[in-house]
Image: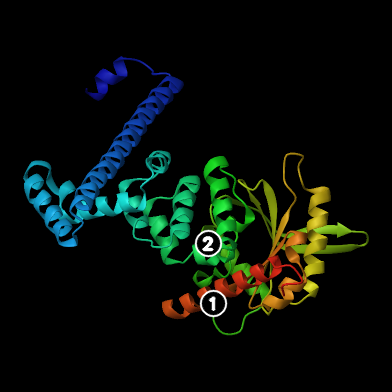
Amino acid sequence: MAKKEIEQLGVCPRQLLTDVRSLIAQARAGVAVAVNSGIVTMYWAIGRRISLEILKKRRAEYGEAIVRTLSVKLAPEYGEGVSEKNLRHMVRFYEVFQDEKIVSALRRQLSWTHFKALIYIKDALKRDFYAEMCRVENWNTRTLERKIGGMLYERTALSRKPAKLAELELRKLKEEDTLTPDLVFRDPYFLDFLGLKGAYQEKDIEAAILREMEAFILELGAGFTFVARQKRMQVGPDDFYLDLLFFHRKLRRLVAIELKFDKFKPEFKGQMELYLRWLNKYERQPHEEAPIGLILCAGKSEEQVELLELDKSGIKVAEYLTELPSRSALETRLHQAIAHARERLLAQEQPENIR
Protein backbone atom coordinates (compact mmCIF):
# COMPACT_ATOMS: atom_id res chain seq x y z
CA MET A 1 0.00 0.00 0.00
CA ALA A 2 1.35 3.45 -0.97
CA LYS A 3 2.20 6.04 1.69
CA LYS A 4 -0.55 8.36 0.40
CA GLU A 5 -3.20 5.64 0.75
CA ILE A 6 -2.04 4.90 4.32
CA GLU A 7 -2.34 8.61 5.20
CA GLN A 8 -5.90 8.69 3.80
CA LEU A 9 -6.93 5.87 6.15
CA GLY A 10 -6.45 8.17 9.13
CA VAL A 11 -4.72 7.76 12.48
CA CYS A 12 -4.46 4.27 13.97
CA PRO A 13 -4.83 4.28 17.78
CA ARG A 14 -1.42 3.58 19.31
CA GLN A 15 -2.80 1.20 21.94
CA LEU A 16 -4.61 -0.84 19.28
CA LEU A 17 -1.39 -1.17 17.28
CA THR A 18 0.54 -2.21 20.42
CA ASP A 19 -2.09 -4.78 21.42
CA VAL A 20 -2.26 -6.40 17.97
CA ARG A 21 1.53 -6.61 17.75
CA SER A 22 1.58 -8.20 21.19
CA LEU A 23 -1.06 -10.79 20.16
CA ILE A 24 0.94 -11.69 17.04
CA ALA A 25 4.16 -12.04 19.06
CA GLN A 26 2.42 -14.21 21.68
CA ALA A 27 0.91 -16.47 19.02
CA ARG A 28 4.26 -16.89 17.26
CA ALA A 29 5.99 -17.68 20.56
CA GLY A 30 3.27 -20.23 21.36
CA VAL A 31 3.69 -21.90 17.97
CA ALA A 32 7.49 -22.04 18.44
CA VAL A 33 7.09 -23.65 21.88
CA ALA A 34 4.59 -26.19 20.53
CA VAL A 35 6.86 -27.09 17.59
CA ASN A 36 9.91 -27.46 19.85
CA SER A 37 7.94 -29.57 22.33
CA GLY A 38 6.74 -31.81 19.51
CA ILE A 39 10.27 -32.28 18.13
CA VAL A 40 11.69 -33.18 21.55
CA THR A 41 8.86 -35.67 22.16
CA MET A 42 9.35 -37.24 18.72
CA TYR A 43 13.12 -37.58 19.13
CA TRP A 44 12.69 -39.18 22.56
CA ALA A 45 10.14 -41.66 21.11
CA ILE A 46 12.46 -42.51 18.18
CA GLY A 47 15.37 -43.01 20.57
CA ARG A 48 13.22 -45.29 22.72
CA ARG A 49 12.07 -47.37 19.77
CA ILE A 50 15.62 -47.85 18.43
CA SER A 51 16.91 -48.69 21.93
CA LEU A 52 14.24 -51.36 22.40
CA GLU A 53 15.11 -52.86 19.00
CA ILE A 54 18.81 -53.00 19.90
CA LEU A 55 18.01 -54.58 23.29
CA LYS A 56 16.14 -57.42 21.53
CA LYS A 57 19.34 -58.53 19.77
CA ARG A 58 21.71 -57.69 22.68
CA ARG A 59 24.56 -57.09 20.25
CA ALA A 60 26.48 -53.81 20.01
CA GLU A 61 27.38 -54.39 16.35
CA TYR A 62 23.68 -54.80 15.54
CA GLY A 63 22.99 -51.42 17.11
CA GLU A 64 25.65 -49.79 14.95
CA ALA A 65 24.24 -51.39 11.81
CA ILE A 66 20.57 -50.65 12.53
CA VAL A 67 21.20 -46.93 13.15
CA ARG A 68 23.21 -46.65 9.95
CA THR A 69 20.57 -48.52 7.93
CA LEU A 70 17.71 -46.44 9.36
CA SER A 71 19.47 -43.23 8.39
CA VAL A 72 20.11 -44.43 4.83
CA LYS A 73 16.44 -45.39 4.44
CA LEU A 74 14.92 -42.31 6.09
CA ALA A 75 17.24 -39.43 5.12
CA PRO A 76 16.02 -39.14 1.49
CA GLU A 77 12.50 -38.78 2.87
CA TYR A 78 13.04 -36.62 5.98
CA GLY A 79 16.41 -34.92 5.54
CA GLU A 80 19.17 -34.15 8.04
CA GLY A 81 16.88 -34.57 11.06
CA VAL A 82 17.34 -38.34 10.74
CA SER A 83 21.03 -38.41 9.91
CA GLU A 84 23.07 -41.20 11.49
CA LYS A 85 24.61 -38.72 13.92
CA ASN A 86 21.24 -37.32 14.99
CA LEU A 87 19.76 -40.80 15.42
CA ARG A 88 22.64 -41.62 17.78
CA HIS A 89 21.79 -38.47 19.74
CA MET A 90 18.19 -39.70 20.01
CA VAL A 91 19.29 -43.10 21.33
CA ARG A 92 21.53 -41.40 23.88
CA PHE A 93 18.65 -39.06 24.77
CA TYR A 94 16.42 -41.99 25.68
CA GLU A 95 19.22 -43.79 27.55
CA VAL A 96 19.82 -40.74 29.76
CA PHE A 97 16.21 -39.54 30.16
CA GLN A 98 14.22 -42.78 30.35
CA ASP A 99 11.47 -41.25 32.49
CA GLU A 100 8.97 -39.67 30.07
CA LYS A 101 7.56 -37.47 32.87
CA ILE A 102 10.93 -35.72 33.28
CA VAL A 103 11.11 -35.06 29.53
CA SER A 104 7.54 -33.72 29.55
CA ALA A 105 8.40 -31.33 32.40
CA LEU A 106 11.47 -29.95 30.59
CA ARG A 107 10.43 -29.89 26.93
CA ARG A 108 8.55 -26.55 27.05
CA GLN A 109 11.66 -24.68 28.24
CA LEU A 110 14.47 -26.78 26.77
CA SER A 111 15.05 -27.19 23.05
CA TRP A 112 16.64 -30.16 21.29
CA THR A 113 19.97 -28.29 21.24
CA HIS A 114 19.74 -27.92 25.04
CA PHE A 115 19.20 -31.65 25.41
CA LYS A 116 22.12 -32.44 23.09
CA ALA A 117 24.40 -30.44 25.41
CA LEU A 118 23.05 -32.29 28.47
CA ILE A 119 22.92 -35.91 27.35
CA TYR A 120 26.69 -36.39 27.22
CA ILE A 121 27.22 -35.26 30.84
CA LYS A 122 27.98 -38.57 32.56
CA ASP A 123 27.33 -37.54 36.17
CA ALA A 124 23.54 -37.76 36.73
CA LEU A 125 23.47 -35.13 39.52
CA LYS A 126 25.49 -32.72 37.45
CA ARG A 127 23.21 -33.29 34.46
CA ASP A 128 20.07 -32.76 36.57
CA PHE A 129 21.56 -29.57 38.02
CA TYR A 130 22.15 -28.04 34.58
CA ALA A 131 18.75 -29.17 33.28
CA GLU A 132 16.87 -27.63 36.22
CA MET A 133 18.89 -24.40 36.28
CA CYS A 134 18.31 -24.12 32.55
CA ARG A 135 14.58 -24.45 33.12
CA VAL A 136 14.36 -22.11 36.12
CA GLU A 137 16.69 -19.39 34.80
CA ASN A 138 15.62 -19.73 31.15
CA TRP A 139 19.14 -20.15 29.73
CA ASN A 140 19.60 -20.25 25.98
CA THR A 141 21.88 -22.94 24.50
CA ARG A 142 24.91 -20.66 24.37
CA THR A 143 24.52 -19.78 28.06
CA LEU A 144 24.15 -23.45 28.99
CA GLU A 145 27.31 -24.37 27.08
CA ARG A 146 29.18 -21.48 28.72
CA LYS A 147 28.04 -22.58 32.20
CA ILE A 148 29.13 -26.17 31.55
CA GLY A 149 32.47 -24.99 30.14
CA GLY A 150 32.96 -22.72 33.15
CA MET A 151 32.38 -25.69 35.51
CA LEU A 152 29.49 -23.96 37.25
CA TYR A 153 28.27 -27.15 38.93
CA GLU A 154 31.70 -27.88 40.43
CA ARG A 155 31.80 -24.34 41.81
CA THR A 156 28.50 -24.59 43.72
CA ALA A 157 28.07 -25.80 47.29
CA LEU A 158 25.64 -28.40 45.96
CA SER A 159 28.47 -30.37 44.30
CA ARG A 160 30.26 -30.58 47.65
CA LYS A 161 27.39 -32.27 49.46
CA PRO A 162 26.90 -36.04 49.76
CA ALA A 163 24.82 -37.37 46.85
CA LYS A 164 21.66 -37.97 48.91
CA LEU A 165 21.56 -34.38 50.23
CA ALA A 166 22.22 -32.97 46.75
CA GLU A 167 19.43 -35.12 45.30
CA LEU A 168 16.98 -33.81 47.92
CA GLU A 169 17.85 -30.21 47.09
CA LEU A 170 17.45 -30.81 43.35
CA ARG A 171 14.12 -32.56 43.93
CA LYS A 172 12.90 -29.50 45.82
CA LEU A 173 13.94 -27.33 42.88
CA LYS A 174 12.09 -29.62 40.43
CA GLU A 175 8.89 -29.90 42.45
CA GLU A 176 8.64 -26.45 44.07
CA ASP A 177 10.95 -24.20 41.99
CA THR A 178 12.70 -23.40 45.27
CA LEU A 179 16.15 -21.91 44.69
CA THR A 180 18.53 -22.10 47.69
CA PRO A 181 21.76 -20.18 48.34
CA ASP A 182 23.71 -23.40 47.72
CA LEU A 183 22.43 -23.36 44.13
CA VAL A 184 23.03 -19.63 43.64
CA PHE A 185 26.47 -18.93 45.14
CA ARG A 186 29.70 -20.38 43.82
CA ASP A 187 33.36 -20.71 44.73
CA PRO A 188 35.58 -19.57 43.13
CA TYR A 189 34.23 -16.67 41.07
CA PHE A 190 35.90 -15.98 37.72
CA LEU A 191 36.74 -12.28 37.50
CA ASP A 192 39.25 -12.51 34.68
CA PHE A 193 37.10 -10.11 32.62
CA LEU A 194 38.10 -7.28 34.99
CA GLY A 195 41.57 -7.18 33.43
CA LEU A 196 43.36 -6.84 36.80
CA LYS A 197 47.03 -7.83 36.69
CA GLY A 198 49.96 -7.32 39.03
CA ALA A 199 49.43 -5.35 42.25
CA TYR A 200 45.96 -3.94 42.91
CA GLN A 201 43.83 -2.87 45.88
CA GLU A 202 40.19 -3.32 46.94
CA LYS A 203 39.18 0.00 45.37
CA ASP A 204 40.64 -1.19 42.04
CA ILE A 205 38.51 -4.36 42.16
CA GLU A 206 35.39 -2.34 42.97
CA ALA A 207 36.08 0.21 40.22
CA ALA A 208 36.67 -2.58 37.68
CA ILE A 209 33.43 -4.32 38.69
CA LEU A 210 31.46 -1.10 38.26
CA ARG A 211 32.99 -0.71 34.78
CA GLU A 212 32.11 -4.30 33.92
CA MET A 213 28.84 -4.56 35.87
CA GLU A 214 27.03 -6.52 33.15
CA ALA A 215 29.79 -9.15 33.01
CA PHE A 216 29.96 -9.27 36.82
CA ILE A 217 26.21 -9.91 37.11
CA LEU A 218 26.52 -12.65 34.46
CA GLU A 219 29.17 -14.31 36.63
CA LEU A 220 27.05 -13.89 39.77
CA GLY A 221 24.16 -15.61 37.97
CA ALA A 222 20.56 -14.88 36.99
CA GLY A 223 18.32 -13.01 39.42
CA PHE A 224 20.82 -10.47 40.76
CA THR A 225 19.94 -6.77 40.58
CA PHE A 226 22.45 -4.05 41.49
CA VAL A 227 21.25 -1.79 44.32
CA ALA A 228 24.17 0.33 45.55
CA ARG A 229 27.93 0.75 45.92
CA GLN A 230 29.56 1.97 49.12
CA LYS A 231 26.23 1.66 50.93
CA ARG A 232 26.39 3.98 53.95
CA MET A 233 25.34 2.51 57.29
CA GLN A 234 25.17 4.77 60.29
CA VAL A 235 25.59 3.03 63.65
CA GLY A 236 25.65 5.52 66.53
CA PRO A 237 28.34 8.11 65.83
CA ASP A 238 30.12 5.89 63.26
CA ASP A 239 29.62 5.43 59.54
CA PHE A 240 30.33 2.13 57.78
CA TYR A 241 30.37 1.49 54.04
CA LEU A 242 29.42 -1.78 52.35
CA ASP A 243 31.25 -2.33 49.05
CA LEU A 244 28.33 -3.63 46.95
CA LEU A 245 24.66 -4.30 47.61
CA PHE A 246 22.48 -6.49 45.36
CA PHE A 247 19.00 -7.98 45.52
CA HIS A 248 18.22 -11.53 44.37
CA ARG A 249 14.68 -11.98 43.03
CA LYS A 250 14.38 -15.74 43.44
CA LEU A 251 15.92 -15.79 46.92
CA ARG A 252 13.89 -12.67 47.78
CA ARG A 253 16.68 -11.16 49.85
CA LEU A 254 19.37 -8.51 49.85
CA VAL A 255 22.91 -9.72 49.13
CA ALA A 256 25.78 -7.79 50.72
CA ILE A 257 29.15 -8.21 49.00
CA GLU A 258 32.50 -7.28 50.54
CA LEU A 259 35.66 -7.32 48.40
CA LYS A 260 39.03 -8.22 49.95
CA PHE A 261 42.28 -8.15 48.02
CA ASP A 262 44.00 -10.45 50.53
CA LYS A 263 43.17 -13.80 52.15
CA PHE A 264 40.18 -14.30 54.39
CA LYS A 265 40.67 -13.24 58.02
CA PRO A 266 38.42 -14.17 60.98
CA GLU A 267 37.69 -10.51 61.71
CA PHE A 268 35.86 -10.23 58.37
CA LYS A 269 33.03 -12.21 59.97
CA GLY A 270 32.25 -9.53 62.57
CA GLN A 271 32.26 -6.80 59.95
CA MET A 272 29.82 -8.69 57.70
CA GLU A 273 27.56 -9.62 60.65
CA LEU A 274 27.25 -5.92 61.49
CA TYR A 275 26.29 -5.10 57.90
CA LEU A 276 23.71 -7.90 57.72
CA ARG A 277 22.07 -6.92 61.01
CA TRP A 278 21.88 -3.29 59.93
CA LEU A 279 20.33 -4.28 56.59
CA ASN A 280 17.90 -6.60 58.38
CA LYS A 281 16.78 -3.80 60.67
CA TYR A 282 16.65 -0.84 58.30
CA GLU A 283 16.39 -2.13 54.69
CA ARG A 284 14.61 -5.49 54.74
CA GLN A 285 11.01 -5.41 53.49
CA PRO A 286 8.22 -7.49 55.14
CA HIS A 287 8.01 -9.99 52.24
CA GLU A 288 11.78 -10.57 52.08
CA GLU A 289 14.03 -13.23 53.60
CA ALA A 290 16.93 -12.22 55.86
CA PRO A 291 19.87 -10.57 54.04
CA ILE A 292 22.81 -12.79 53.13
CA GLY A 293 26.48 -11.86 52.86
CA LEU A 294 29.23 -12.81 50.41
CA ILE A 295 32.87 -12.12 51.24
CA LEU A 296 35.04 -12.31 48.12
CA CYS A 297 38.70 -12.94 48.96
CA ALA A 298 41.96 -13.66 47.17
CA GLY A 299 42.24 -16.88 49.21
CA LYS A 300 40.94 -18.65 52.32
CA SER A 301 41.61 -21.38 54.85
CA GLU A 302 38.82 -23.97 54.73
CA GLU A 303 39.47 -24.85 58.37
CA GLN A 304 39.04 -21.24 59.51
CA VAL A 305 35.80 -20.89 57.55
CA GLU A 306 34.50 -24.16 58.99
CA LEU A 307 35.39 -23.30 62.61
CA LEU A 308 33.68 -19.90 62.36
CA GLU A 309 30.39 -21.59 61.28
CA LEU A 310 29.68 -18.73 58.90
CA ASP A 311 26.58 -20.39 57.43
CA LYS A 312 24.80 -19.88 60.77
CA SER A 313 25.30 -16.14 60.32
CA GLY A 314 24.13 -16.18 56.69
CA ILE A 315 27.63 -15.53 55.37
CA LYS A 316 29.32 -17.11 52.35
CA VAL A 317 33.05 -16.89 51.69
CA ALA A 318 34.43 -17.44 48.20
CA GLU A 319 37.67 -16.89 46.37
CA TYR A 320 37.92 -14.90 43.18
CA LEU A 321 40.32 -15.51 40.31
CA THR A 322 41.43 -12.53 38.24
CA GLU A 323 43.55 -14.81 36.04
CA LEU A 324 42.28 -18.29 35.18
CA PRO A 325 44.56 -21.33 35.44
CA SER A 326 44.63 -23.99 32.73
CA ARG A 327 41.53 -26.15 32.35
CA SER A 328 43.28 -29.23 33.78
CA ALA A 329 44.62 -27.28 36.79
CA LEU A 330 41.17 -25.84 37.47
CA GLU A 331 39.53 -29.27 37.22
CA THR A 332 42.07 -30.75 39.66
CA ARG A 333 41.57 -27.90 42.12
CA LEU A 334 37.76 -28.07 42.04
CA HIS A 335 37.60 -31.87 42.26
CA GLN A 336 39.94 -31.81 45.27
CA ALA A 337 37.77 -29.16 46.94
CA ILE A 338 34.64 -31.25 46.31
CA ALA A 339 36.26 -34.40 47.74
CA HIS A 340 37.51 -32.58 50.87
CA ALA A 341 34.13 -30.89 51.48
CA ARG A 342 32.26 -34.20 51.21
CA GLU A 343 34.72 -35.86 53.61
CA ARG A 344 34.18 -33.08 56.17
CA LEU A 345 30.40 -33.34 55.90
CA LEU A 346 30.45 -37.12 56.30
CA ALA A 347 32.76 -36.81 59.32
CA GLN A 348 30.33 -34.33 60.93
CA GLU A 349 27.45 -36.78 60.48
CA GLN A 350 29.22 -39.61 62.30
CA PRO A 351 28.33 -40.10 66.01
CA GLU A 352 31.06 -39.19 68.51
CA ASN A 353 31.64 -42.80 69.59
CA ILE A 354 32.39 -43.89 66.02
CA ARG A 355 35.02 -41.19 65.43
| Helix, strand or loop status at disc 1 | helix
**What colour scheme does the image use?**
rainbow
Quarter the C terminus occupies: bottom right
- Can residue 318 be seen here? The reply is yes
Label number found at residue 219: 2
Q: Residue furthest bottom?
A: 198
Depth order, front residue of 298/180? 180
Please tell me which residue is depicted at 45% across the width and 66% down the height of the picture.
150
Q: CA distance from mark 1 to mark 2?
A: 22 Å
| Helix, strand or loop status at disc 2 | helix
Q: How many marks?
A: 2
Please tell me which residue is depicted at 45% across the width and 61% down the height of the picture.
147
Q: Residue furthest top?
A: 9
Residue identified by numbered label 1: 336
Left-right relation of 321 to 113: right
- The location of residue 223, given as percent across then percent down, is 57, 49
- The location of residue 340, given as percent across then percent down, is 60, 75
